[in-house]
Amino acid sequence: MQGLVNSLRSEIPELVSISADITRSIGLQFEYLEKPKSNIGDGFGSPRAHNGEDSVPIQDIKKRR
């Protein structure tokens, strides 16, 4: 019986560590979901505008086609 108790005592810190990692991971996922998303990368933001470049007029885009 003493061997079983010693075995459980050595496993408890490992289990606590695993549960803390899982809890932290879940918390990070909820934190990510709660952050407001920026326009960059959602299909509507312009990569040129993100880089600080001037926007291209619609007429220029139509001429390129």
Image: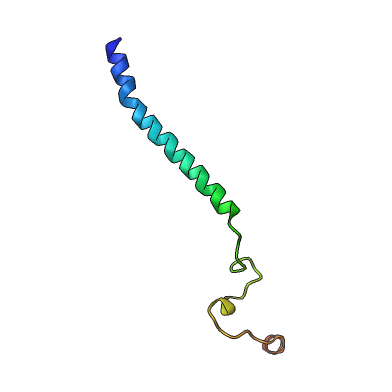
Q: Residue at x 61, y 60 (%)?
A: 36
Question: Taking 37 as reference, is 27 left or right?
Answer: left
Q: Is residue 51 left or right of residue 56?
A: left
Residue at 36 percent across and 26 percent down: it is 12
The correct choice, above or below, for 51 with respect to 42 in the image is below
Residue 34 against residue 37 in the figure, above or below: above
Residue drawn where x is 30% and y is 9% of the image: 1
At which x and y percent is residue 39? Answer: 62, 68
Q: Where's residue 4, x and y in %?
A: 31, 15
Relative to 41, say whether 21 is above or below: above
- Residue 41 in which image quadrant: bottom right
As drawn, 48 above or below 28:
below
Residue 45, quarter of the rendered image: bottom right
**How many marks overall?**
0
Q: Residue at x 34, y 20 (%)?
A: 8
Colour mode of the rendering: rainbow
Q: Position of residue 61 (x, y in %)?
A: 68, 85
Depth check: 3 or 65 in front? 3
Residue 21, image x and y in percent?
A: 43, 40
Position of residue 27 in the picture relative to residue 17 (left or right): right
In this picture, residue 13 sits left or right of residue 50: left
